[in-house]
Amino acid sequence: MIKAKKLFSKSLYIELAIAVCISVLLGAICYFFLARLSVDVSSSKWYENTYKEYKINSLIDNLQTFIYEESVNSGDTSPLNDWYDSHPRAFFYLKKDNSIIYSSFYNPGYAETTIDADDAEFKENVDIYSDYFPEQTTRTLRLTDCEVTLCLFTDIQYSLYSNLLRLSIAISAFISLISIILFVRNKIHYINDVTQGIRILEGGNLDYQIPVKGNDEISQVAESLNSMRIALDQQMKNEKQALQANNSLVTALSHDLRTPLTTQMGYLEILKEHHYNSPEEMDKYINTALNTCHQIKEMSDRLFEYFLAFDPHPERPAEALEEYDGVALFMQLISELSLPLEAQGFSFEFEEPKDTFNIHVNMNDILRIFNNVFTNIDKYADETEPVRIRIFHDNENAVLSITNKIRKEPRKNESAKIGLISISSLMKRQSGASKTRTTKDNFTLELKFPIRNEL
């Protein structure tokens, strides 16, 4: 049932067509029952015992009133034509003695003013009207100059049925129209809800979710707006985080730079003024100033990495990439950067692939990536456990996986805390990706490089 509903509710055109069909069906069902009810009412005991007598008496009273108002007399019955015109299904004639002084069976302006009641043509007309109008009533009416006998031919039952049938048609059409209006009204209300949601989003409330109702074009617009809202909200959060990180970096660097710069300036002033007592003391001051230069260089490198990490267009053009043997390149960089760590007590375990592969990378970026990786090992890895390095590949990607045990206390503090972000950004420059996994004791970094196979 749900699948069928989704199938037939993917377009406003289909929904409108279904709504029209349902409305017409409801109207037809309503008309069927009302038509049956009209037949039952027009043939009911209420009609026979109450309504028929009431309508006949109303007609006769209305005619009698008309006679009084128009002063109709037996010598001039022509005003009765006006009453007949306003009651076309009430046929009658007036009889005085044995003469017919008025008959609606004939056209107005008929030459004869009176007709003999025994006239053959007149009797034939009476018989014809008797067949079509079975309800016949005879009453006494009072003209202005005499009393006459009224013979009334009418069909109250057919008139009642016709009126009820017309009412049934009107009610059925009204129900069909109301059904379509309700459908359109729901859609208009939903459009208003979506419009109100857009106004709320325009006001800056990105937490508001526009309701999604149905599965048509309007609901698709609502879903798209919600997706756009989420993306915009995430973008604004990222920008806010980037701004906070920028402020934190500027604050940290301004604090970190102030101390070595002050120290360096102090020792340079001492050297400039020759305020030292021996060559050994001078060498000490020079070494201290040189160390502060290294500190300043390291901080400036962090600043560069920060702006690299938040580069909005990180990927390098194809002409900036060069082709290398992946295994040879990785092993060369690992062997060079691992030597200082091995001197500090670190050990490394390698798992090399059985065959080689080619990758396209930028050498400067690769050097920064590996420098960051081994700097993190130096800071955060526990030298009592070996660092496990695994190189493997499939038909599309080569992966360098590095796993180390996490040191309880890092060797050094990193002010900016953006080493992994920088690695991720540098990997994107090579059309690659980085992924980290942290357990209770171990940290794993995976660098994924696309393999460029030559056809």
Image (cartoon, helix red, strand yellow):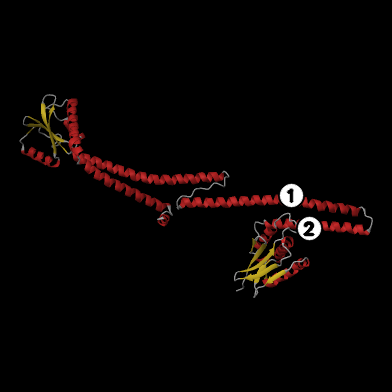
Element under disc 1? helix
Q: Nearer the viewer, residue 253 or 168?
A: 253
Q: Is residue 35 visible?
A: yes
Characterize the local packing of mark 2: few (<14), some (14-19) or many (20 or more) Cα atoms within 10 angstroms: few
Q: Residues within 10 Å of mark 1 (few under 14, many from 20)?
A: some
- In the displayed structure, would residue 10 be above or below residue 383? above
Seen at 38% across and 44% down, the residue is 181
32 sits to left or right of 357: left
Residue drawn at the location 86% of the way across and 59% of the way down: 287
Q: For the C terminus, which image quadrant?
A: bottom right
Residue 38: name its quadrant. top left
Does 251 appear above or below 64?
below
The residue that label 2 is drawn on is 297
Q: Position of residue 172 (x, y in %)?
A: 30, 44
Return the mark for residue 251.
1
Q: Position of residue 86 (x, y in %)?
A: 21, 34
Report the number of discs.
Answer: 2
Q: Please give left or right for residue 34 compared with residue 310 in the image.
A: left
